[in-house]
Structures are given as C-alpha cells and as structure tokens.
Amino acid sequence: MGTVRGAERGGEREPRQERSRATRRRLLEAAVACLADRGVAGTTVGAVAERAGVSRGAAQHHFRTREDLFTAALRHMSDTRMADLRESAERLPSGPGRTEAVVEMLVDAYCGPVFSAALQLWASAASDPALRASVIPLEEHVGREAHRAAVEVLGADESAPGVRETVQATLDMGRGLGLAALLTDDTARRRRIVGQWARILDRELAERTR
C-alpha cells in the first residue's frame, strides 16, 4: 500500500510540475513581449502576470523580484534566439544562392520582438551594474554561438587571415540593421544591403581561402 500511495503521489507531482513549467514559460514569453512593447519601465511583475493570464501571486512564486524576472527572461531570450538560428540553418538552400540566404538568416536573427526586448535590457544595463552583470555573460554566450553557427553554415575557414573578422563583421552588420528596423520598416533597403553584402562575402571568403 505504501508503494501504491507513493506512486500515486509521484503521479500527482508530475502534472503539477508540468503545470508549473507551463506557467513559468508563459510568464517568460509575456515578459519578452512586455519588454518589446513597453520597455523596462513598463515591465513589472504585475504587468507580466496580467499579460500571461496568471495571478500576481503565481508570478511572484516563480520570480520574487523584477530583477529575478529580467534575469530569467534574458536566459529565455538567449535560448530562443539560438534555437531559432539553428532551426533556420536547417532550412538553408544549397547552391549559388546559399550565401545570400545565410546573410539574410543572420540579419533576421537581429530583427523581431525577441531582439527588441533584449535591446531594452541592454540599454537599461548600461546604468544598472547588477543587470549588466547578468546581461554581459549571456550576450557573450549568444555571440560566440552565433559566430560558430555563421562559420559553419558559410563553410568558412577561420585559419585564413581575416576570415574570422569578416564573419564577425557580418554579425555586427546584422545587429546594426536590427537596430535600424526598430523605428521604421526598412525591409526593402535591408534586402538590398543583404544582397550586396552576400556578393562581397562570397568574393572575400574565396580570396582569403585560396
């Protein structure tokens, strides 16, 4: 009987734990959306709870302070950005148009609500030492992973002089274009730049690896 009751209690814990994980996930997604829409000032635990459709008490059970919420949201955004990048990489075409598709993928990684939310936290971290201490290592991790992914999908040989810097310039350009897209829709201009940079990149990588 003790074993049966223990199994029953274990079975009860699993759905409860799954509900808790689902609630936490909703809160993190709501935090990202709030940061993108309202910025840091408008992203309170209460606002996030309301957006997620959970009680404030439930939100505070997962995140006791706004700083806890921001730190968890940063990790969630880092994971989301890298997962999206890996998924996009699997859909890349082969052949002559591959480089342009790679550049477009990398630029698109810096556009959208997740990047916008991350940017809000970057700006706040500039004057908040505690937040900056959380932001820097996570962004360094994302930067390293993005660079590694870019090298892989471009088939770049970083042992050749200048190739590492050329790949990093592609990522830095993507970040800059993402910043430009925050205020206005410059999709048409961005696509022209992507096409031109892809042509430059093809020539540069070919010359560097001869």
Image (cartoon, rainbow, N blue to C red):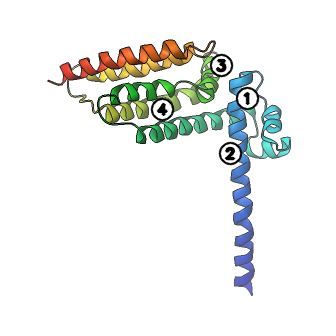
Neighbour tally class for label 4: few under 14, some 14-19, many 20 plus, Cα within 10 Å: some
* Disc on the earlier residue, 4 or 2: 2
CB atoms of marks 1 and 3 within 8 Å: no
| Residue at the spot of label 2 | 25
Neighbour tally class for label 2: few under 14, some 14-19, many 20 plus, Cα within 10 Å: some
* Disc on the earlier residue, 3 or 2: 2
- Viewer-proximal residue, 16 or 136? 16
Q: Which mark is residue 34?
A: 1
Task: Tell us which disc is closer to us: 3 or 2.
Answer: 2
- The residue depicted at 34 percent of the width and 35 percent of the height is 153
* 148 left or right, relative to 130: left
Q: How far separated are the C-alphas under marks 1 and 4?
A: 22 Å
Give how far across and how far down residue 122 sits, in percent.
60, 21
The quadrant of the picture occupied by the N terminus is bottom right
* 106 left or right, relative to 6: left
Neighbour tally class for label 3: few under 14, some 14-19, many 20 plus, Cα within 10 Å: some
